[in-house]
Each structure stands twice: as C-alpha cells, then as structure tokens.
Amino acid sequence: MRRLASAASSVAFLTAVIAAWWLVAETKLINPMFLPGPQRALATLWGWIDSGELWDPLGKTVWRLFAGWLVASAIGIALGAAIASSARARELLEPTAEFLRPLPASALLPPAVLLLGLTDTMIVTVIAFGTVWPILLGSIHGFKAIDPRLIEVARMLRFPPLARAFKFQLPNALPEIFAGMRVSLALALILTVVAEMLSSQPGLGHMVLVAARAFRSADIFAGIFVLGVLGFLTNSLMQYLEAYLLRWRPAHSEG
Amino acid sequence: MSAGAPPVLAARGVSLAFGTPPAARTILSDLAFEVPEREFVCIVGPSGCGKTTLLRVLAGLLPASAGEAHFQGRRVAAPQPDIAIIFQDYGRALLPWRTVAGNVALAFEARGIPKSEHAVRSAPLLAKMRLAEHADKFPAELSGGMQQRVQIARCLAQEPRVLLMDEPFGALDAITRQTLQDEFARLCESEHRTVLFVTHDLEEAIYLGDRVIALAANPGRIVEIIDVDLPRPRRQLETREDYRFLEYRHRLFQHLGHE
C-alpha cells in the first residue's frame, strides 16, 4: 500500500514537471526557438523511431558506455584486490593512483585523441579511465573489510590464495564493489556523451551537439530525453542485478 | 582407548607469551595433556585463562612460544584437514552469501570433491543436523541455533579425525543450548567422535565430557583433571542431579572461583 502510494506520488511529480514545461512553452515564456514544448520533442523522437534514425547512434552510445564501464569494472576490481591484499602492490600503485585520480577525465580527451585517434577505442579508454575510481575504492575497501574469522575458516580448510580470493574476499567485497559500479555507471554516461561531442563520433552525444549547432531545439530535447531514459534504464538494471546478487544480505542493511 | 598408539591430539608443554621479554605476558604456561581416540574432553576455565588461545594453537592457527601441539604423534605447525574447529561466533564463521547447502559444500570444495557429488554427500549431514528443509536459506534467515548447526555440519563435512569446539553453545539461549548439547552428545556417542570442547560453563563441561581439564588464569595452567564417571546417554535432569555430578561440580568450582 505504501509502495503504491509512493509510486503514485512520483508519477504525479513527473507529470507536474512535464505539465510545467508544457505551460512555459505554450505561453511562450521562453522563446520556442530555444525551448520546444514536450509534444514537439516527443514528436521528433517518434520521428526518429519511425524512420529508424535513432537506433544506430543509440546502439553506438550504449556499446561505448558498457564497454568503458565494464573495462573499468574489471580493472578496478582486480587492482583493488591487489592493493588490498599486498603491501608491495599498495606501495607500487597508490602514489600513481593518487596522482591520476583527481584528473578530470574530460581533460584526458585531447591527449587520448592524439594517441588513439578519433576511434571507439579512444572513447572507451577515456570512459574506463574516468569511471574506474569509485570501483577501485570500493574494491580496496571491500577486500580489506573481511572478517578475520572468515580468513581463519579459509585457513582451516586450507584454501590456496586464489581460491580464498574468489570464494571469500570477492563475494565479501561485492556490496562495496556494486556501490562503486553504480556511481561509475552514471559517470560513464556523462563521459560517453562528452567524448562523443568532442570527438564527433556518431552517437547520441554527437546528435545533440549537431542539433544544437543547427538550432534544432526539438532535436536537442529529444536527444536529452533519450539519454535520460538510457540513464534511468541502466541504473534500474544495475539495481535489479544488485538486489538479486546481494539477496543474501539481511533486510535491515539493504539500500 | 588403545595403549601404545599415539593419542589423537596432545599438548606437550605448550606455552605461549605475547610481547617481548620485559613486557611479555604469559598466556599459557606449560600445558600438557592428551586427547585419546573417541574421547570427549572438555576444557573449562574462567575467561582470560587462555582456553580459546589453546584451541587455536592445537588447530595450527597460532604457533606456540614453547612446546608443541601434536596430532597423531606429529607436530601441528599449520591447519590440517583432519582437524576441524567450530567457533563460538557462528554468525561470523559462516559465509553470509552462501546458502546452508553452499556453506556445507565449502568443506567439499576444500577437499576437492567434484561438484556433482556435493548434494548427495551433504544430504545426510543436513538431515543429521536437522537442516534439510533449510538447505536453500541464507544464514541471515536462520536462528542462532540453526546457524551453529550449519557450522557443525560444515565441520563434519570436512570428515575430520578430531573436532575442536570453542564455546560453541555459549552464545545461545538456555533452551537452545540444552537441545544442541543433547543432539551433539548423541551424535558424538553414536559416531565415536574425538572432541576437545572448550567452555567456561562447569556444568556443560561435566555434562558433556568423559574428562574435564580445569584451567586457572594468569597464566593459563592446568589445575585439575577429572575423569567423569557418569552413565551415557546423559540426561538434562537425571545427570545433573546425580550425586557424582554435584561432587565434580563442587571440586571444579573451588578452582574456578566465582564468575
């Protein structure tokens, strides 16, 4: 009952925002050249879907987004495990990581373009670089935070280090890794769009940029709407996955 | 009890000190005793007498400063497949992300038993520990008593020659504790298990043990060893009212003081 009520109120709020948008556009409070009404944006979007124009850039954006994010996840988890379990790895890697971490990933686009050219590899690399940090931090912390009792259980059963990592430490770190991956997913969408805009590679970001240069405001809003839906869906997917994979957690510590 | 064969488990002058000489603190002082095959030996002592530490030395988790722990005549320098330990804090000793069956299977994985055999092998253990219908539940969904049964099942799945138990029922409520005591005692009787059981509860030690070793604290040392001459199976009311039970209790109580 409470869930139903909260769902109803969030839908009501969204409707109110769209209604306000519509009202502002309809009363021409803002020049319609800059702000199209929701009906115009949606009509444009429908046109893209109808003509099939949308699928190619959407597909490319989604591919880059997930490729970059998954590469970041693999690197972040592995490096985090290494840093958490070996003092030598920590000494070796941590100073470099501390230097690279505060760099805005978008600042790395120009050198990435120089080194890798205007390619998908370049975009995926930049996304992976920019989104690896929350996953790395989650992984380090998650791997470190294992209960010493569980390590004793592993010792009593004489699991070799690799089995210990996969059977004990990785699942133990999973909640923290997922928290990092969720933050990174949102970052990845931002970086994908920025990289596409700066590198003129076909994709949703590029579509929005081209529309802006041509003053096609309905296209801009349609593109942004698609990006919003994409962000919402990927985040929901991640939440669903998390809820399933972490279903062993006691109810009170969820969320 | 076979004369001649080495005891399953033995402490040979085990001492343990933490810290460096001037500021060293002696935890265990020259402990010597044996756990013969098929015997249920209890170690009882006040908190701080080092009984958990002793168990960790015997398990191979902690090296002794002097003396040696022996398993079947050989020195225990590291954990061994034939020695299983059941920890008091069952909540921390289970893998929370694995189901009951998954936690038991951990011991099979450690022994390199193929996955296809896990279900067949764990079924009788789960039945024995009354966990059969909870096989697919996660630890967080179980009561404390059930969680401890899972840990016991996992240790049995290891098929060890000796069970080390560190106050396994200490964190449970009185009723659950008695139930588990009886279930566990029956199991050890019928399977002739060799057990070293640590507790701070005198009555639990006498009730379960064939022998009770009493430790005193600061430093941890043996003050008395009692051979418990009480009929088995033991019963919560009759056994605890037996005059010999009361006599043992009286003797041990003097050593351990009041808690």
Image (cartoon, coloured by chain):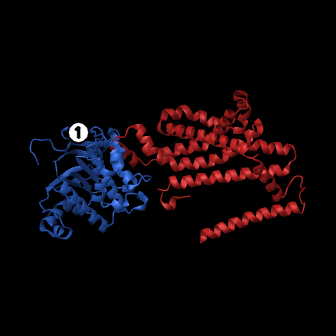
Is B189 positioned to the left or the right of A48 in the image? left
Return the residue at label 1. Answer: B67
The answer to whether any part of residue B99 appears in the image is yes
Residue placed at 20% from the left, 52% from the top? B193
Quadrant position of residue B9: top left
Is B238 positioned to the left or the right of A12 in the image? left
Compare residues B51 and A186 and report the one nearer the observer.
A186
Label 1: chain letter = B
Q: Residue furthest left?
A: B3
Residue placed at 51% from the left, 62% from the top? A252
Judging by colour alone, the chain drawn in red in this rendered image is A
Residue placed at 59% from the left, 47% from the top? A181
Compare residues B122 and B21 and report the one nearer the observer.
B122
Quadrant position of residue A162: top left
Above/below status of A92 relative to A72: above
Q: Residue furthest bottom?
A: A1
Crowdedness near tag 1: few (<14), some (14–19) or many (≥20) residues, C-alpha within 10 Å: some
Is B197 positioned to the left or the right of A59 in the image? left
Residue placed at 75% from the left, 53% from the top? A225
Q: Position of residue B198 (x, y in %)?
A: 26, 54
Which of the image's four quarters has the C terminus of chain B? bottom left
Compare residues A19 and A108 and report the one nearer the observer.
A19
Above/below status of B5 relative to B51: above
Give the residue type at disc 1. Gly
Q: Position of residue A194 (x, y in %)?
A: 74, 41
Is B181 positioned to the left or the right of A12 in the image? left
Judging by colour alone, the chain drawn in blue in this rendered image is B
Q: Secondary structure at mark 1?
A: strand
Q: Position of residue A187 (x, y in %)?
A: 67, 45
The answer to whether any part of residue B50 appears in the image is no
